[in-house]
Image (cartoon, rainbow, N blue to C red):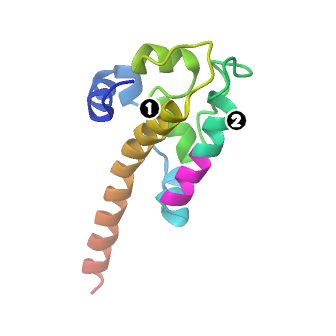
Amino acid sequence: MKDVQEVLARLRESEFRSRVHLRKKELDYLNSKGLGTVLKHAEEFIEKRLAPASPVNDGKQTPWRNHPVFVAQHATATCCRGCLQKWHAIPKGQELTTEEKRYVIEVIKAWLSQYESVSKELGAHRAARHA
């Protein structure tokens, strides 16, 4: 596993990964549910879809939209075991450890947090305009 901020910096340099962003629907969901709830969903998704040694449909198990976690997984290369191995040095073929699962959640949290900050700034800006 690698340093979360270093990995995010490398991902931002990837033409493919850097084009992945939350759409309005996913951003609205993140704002309405809150980061804590969305990260609980992330834990469930990781446990079911990514943690097994040989996940069902590996490489295709993560949808591209309709939940902020799914989008974050593609943006952070935590979407399948192949990407985990390539970008995060977490080997395929063995169940994720508790530490590895925590790391994946931290990467997703760091990526989603940029949207939480933007949303707060936009909300403050809108409130100031209407005050």
Displayed quadrant of residue 2: top left
The numbered disc on residue 24 is: none
Residue at mark 1: 75
Decide whether the magenta segment is chiefly helix, strand or loop.
Answer: helix
Residue 18, image x, y percentages = 36, 29
Indicate the quadrant containing the C terminus: top left, top right, bottom left or bottom right.
bottom left
Indicate the quadrant containing the N terminus: top left, top right, bottom left or bottom right.
top left
Write down the region rendered in magenta. Answer: 36-42
Note whether residue 28 is visible. no
Distance between the Cα atoms at labels 2 and 1?
A: 19 Å
**Where is 26 relative to 13, above or below?**
below
Residue 120, image x, y percentages = 33, 65
Query: Quick check: 16 left or right of 91?
Result: left
Displayed quadrant of residue 59: top right
Q: Disc 2 vs disc 1: which is toward the camera?
A: 2
Amino acid type assigned to the residue bearing label 1 in the image: Ala
Residue 87, image x, y percentages = 41, 19
Question: Is label 1 in a helix, a strand or a loop?
Answer: helix
In depth, the one of 82 and 18 nearer the eye is 82
Residue at the image position 30 percent from the left and 83 percent from the top: 130
In depth, the one of 125 and 42 nearer the eye is 42
Residue at the image position 53 percent from the left and 66 percent from the top: 32
Residue at mark 2: 48
Q: Residue furthest right?
A: 56
In depth, the one of 19 and 59 nearer the eye is 59
